[in-house]
Image (spheres, rainbow, N blue to C red):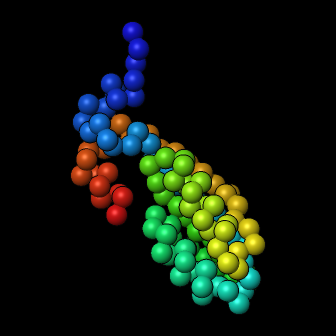
Amino acid sequence: MHSDARDDAPDRPDDAPAEWHVASILVHLRPERSPDVRAAVAALGDVEVHAEERGRMVVTVEGSHEGRIADRMTAIHLMPGVMSAVMVFHHAEPLPARSAEEVATARR
């Protein structure tokens, strides 16, 4: 018999993610472009700037799958003034018991 993650989570709706991903990204940027990069990062959504100092920025990205993390990291890397964006931490948490309301709240 085939066991699916959804079998273990009857309270989770079909379109809810099975995992929630959190990653930290270290961004090296031209210091003079810092305000522009900060604004562009903030506009992405699912991304938060936690620290910034002399051409370095630490951001976290959250999403329902690894592709969301990779997309955000690539978008940051391609921003004018950014020299590199490197993932330094990634964690995936299974979400077997989250309700649709909890998932919707987490996506905001």
Please name the residue shown 63% across and 61% down the image: 74
Residue found at the far top of this picture: 1
Left or right of 33 on screen, residue 63: left
Can you say which quadrant of the picture contains the N terminus?
top left
Left or right of 107 on screen, residue 37: right
Can you say which quadrant of the picture contains the C terminus?
bottom left
Left or right of 72 on screen, residue 88: right
Image: 76 above or below 55: above
Q: What is the total number of numbered labels drawn onto the structure image?
A: 0
Please name the residue shown 49% across and 69% down the image: 44
Image: 13 above or below 89: above
Residue 7 coordinates in the image, percent (x, y): 33, 24
Residue 71 coordinates in the image, percent (x, y): 57, 57
Residue 94 coordinates in the image, percent (x, y): 44, 40
**Toward which corner of the image does residue 77 lie, by quadrant?**
bottom right
Image: 94 above or below 74: above
Please name the residue shown 33% across and 43% down the image: 16
Please name the residue shown 57% across and 80% down the image: 38
Residue 12 makes an appearance in the image: no
**Toward which corner of the image does residue 84 lie, by quadrant?**
bottom right
Residue 3 coordinates in the image, percent (x, y): 40, 18
Image: 15 above or below 104: above
Left or right of 70 on screen, residue 42: left
Residue found at the far bottom of this picture: 32
Residue 16 makes an appearance in the image: yes
